[in-house]
Image (spheres, rainbow, N blue to C red):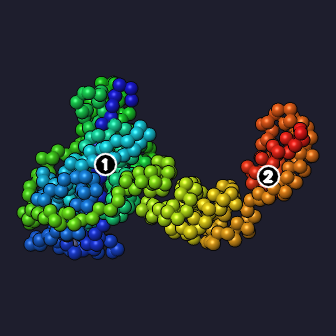
Amino acid sequence: MGEFEAVIGLEVHCQLATKSKIFCACPTTGTAMNQSVCPICTGHPGTLPTLNAEAVALAVKAGLALGMRIELRSIFARKNYFYPDLPKGYQISQHDKPLCESGSLRIETKQGVKDVRIQRIHMEEDAGKNMHFVGYSLVDLNRAGVPLIEIVSEPDMRSADEAGAYLRELHQLVTFLGISDGNLQEGNFRCDANVSVRRPGEPFGVRVEIKNVNSFRYVEKAIEYEIARHIRCLQSGDTIHMETRGYDAQKDETYVMRSKASVDDYRFFVEPDLMPLVLEQAWVDAIHIPELPQAMKERWVRDFGISHYDAQVLAQTKRRSAFFEQAARHGNTKIVANLISGEILRLMSLAGCEIDEAHITCQDIIDAASLVAADTVSHTGIKLVLAEVWTHGGPLEPWVDKLGVRQVSDQGFLDTLVAEVCQENPGQVAEFRAGKEKLLGFFVGHVMKKSGGKAHPQKVGEAVKAYMQRGLG
Ligand SMILES: [Zn+2]
C-alpha cells in the first residue's frame, strides 16, 4: 500500500425469508421458471401492490440487530430503468426516507476489533433474472418482486480483509436471526463493493463499484485487485474513471461493465400506489431480538474459556453453534471445543456437510471428551474413534475397544516394557545416564511401539525416568 490508503464501502442485498413476495401472494420458492408470477409482480396496468407485513418485520429485525434507528414513517419510491428482467420498467425501492438509519456492526480481523458504521437499510423488490446463451437470452421472472433489504455501510473499511470480515459477520447475523437463508449460490446474499484509494487525510478518490460478486473470497480478491489497479493509476498519473466493474474469477481481474449511472438517471419519485409505511412503536418493540452471534462468541470465550479463533469457527453456522453449545454445557468444554474445531471440522469439510447431518451425536462428543479428560484415550486415539462414529454411528465405547485405543496406565505392565526396551538398547541407556536426556523420546517411542500404541505416553516417560534413576542408585 505504501503511502496510499484504500476506502471501501459495501452494499449488501439480502433476500428476506418470507413465503410470499413483497407486494403480491406469489411464492418466493419452489416453482419452475416463470411459474411464480402474477399481474402484480409483472406490473400489469390496473394492478396495485400490497405490502407484505412479514417482510417489514424481518427488515426491522435486521435494523434492531444492527443497533439502528427504526423510522416509524418511511416512503417507497420508484426507481426507473429499462432492462429485460424488469417488465414494469421500474423497481419499487426506498430512496430518501429509508426504514432504518445509522447503526454499526463489530468486526474482527488480525488487526483487531473495529466497528463499521451502517448508514441505512431500505426495503425493495428484486428484479427477474436474465440468462444468456449463444445468440439468445431468456428471462425468468420468479425473482421479480421477491423482498430484499439493502444494507449500506459507511466507507469505513480500509482493506479487503476488513471487507471480508464485515460480510461474514453480517451474513452470520442475518442467518442466525432467520432474516434470510443467506444462500450465496442463489444470490440471496450478494454484495456490491465501492472502492477508492487516497493518501491518508486527503478527500476520497474516484470510486468504482464492483458488482454482483457472490463469494466472500472473490469479493476480497476483486477488492485487492482494484486497490492495486488504483495505486498503479495514481502513481503513473492515469485517470481513474467512475464506473461499474465486474470480476472474472478465472482470470482474477476486474473488467469494465458500464460507466456508472448517476442517481438522476433513475428519476426517483414517490411510489403513487403505496401509502407511506407507518409503524407503531409498540409493534417495533414487540419484535424479539435473541442473543446475537457476536455476543454469543464473547460469552463462549468468557464462560467456556475457549479461544477467539475456536469461537469463530464453532459459530460459523447456527446449527453448528447449537450443537457445540449443548455439548459444551454437558461435557468438558475445552476438550469439546478442541474436538469439534479440529477433527470434526476436518470430517465435515471432507464430507461437505454440516455437523448434524452425520451419524455423530452430541452425546458422542461429550463421551469422547470425558475419555480424553480421564486419560483413557489419547488425542490421537480419539480421532480414530470419532472418524468411525462419524461414518457408522455410535455409541462410542465399543469403538474404543474395537480399535484398541484404550490407553494402558497399569504400572507393572509399563515397567516390564520399559525394562525390555532398556535391555535391548544398553548403549543409549548409558548415554542417557551420562546426561543425554533428550534420548527420553527415543525410549518412549520404543515403548509405545511395543505396546501397540496403547501405553499412556506421559506415564511411559515417568516409568523410563524411574528406571534410569533406579539403575544409578
Ligand atoms: Zn406476483
- Left of 82 or right of it: where is 433? right
Sort mark 1 into few (<14), some (14-19) or many (20+) by Cα contacts within 10 Å: some
In whole angstroms, how far apart are the C-alphas of marks 2 and 1? 51 Å
Which residue is more in the foreground, 69 or 256? 69
Front: mark 2 or 1 = 2
Q: What residue type is labelled 2?
A: Met
User: Where residue 408 sits in the image (x, y, percent)?
Assistant: 77, 59
Question: In percent of the image, x 26 and y 27: which residue is there?
Answer: 201
Q: What residue type is labelled 1?
A: Leu
Read off the residue under disc 1.
105
> Element under label 1?
strand
Sort mark 2 into few (<14), some (14-19) or many (20+) by Cα contacts within 10 Å: some
User: Where residue 473 sits in the image (x, y, percent)?
Assistant: 89, 39
Read off the residue under disc 2.
448
Q: Do the residues labelled 2 and 1 touch (CB within 8 Å)?
A: no
- Left of 60 or right of it: where is 472? right
> Element under label 2?
helix
User: Where residue 330 sits in the image (x, y, percent)?
Assistant: 52, 65
Which residue is more in the foreground, 328 or 210? 328
Q: Is residue 418 above or below residue 184?
A: above
Question: In percent of the image, x 47 and y 48: which residue is there?
Answer: 308
Residue 433 appearing in the image: yes
The quadrant of the rendered image in which ligand 1 is seen is: bottom left
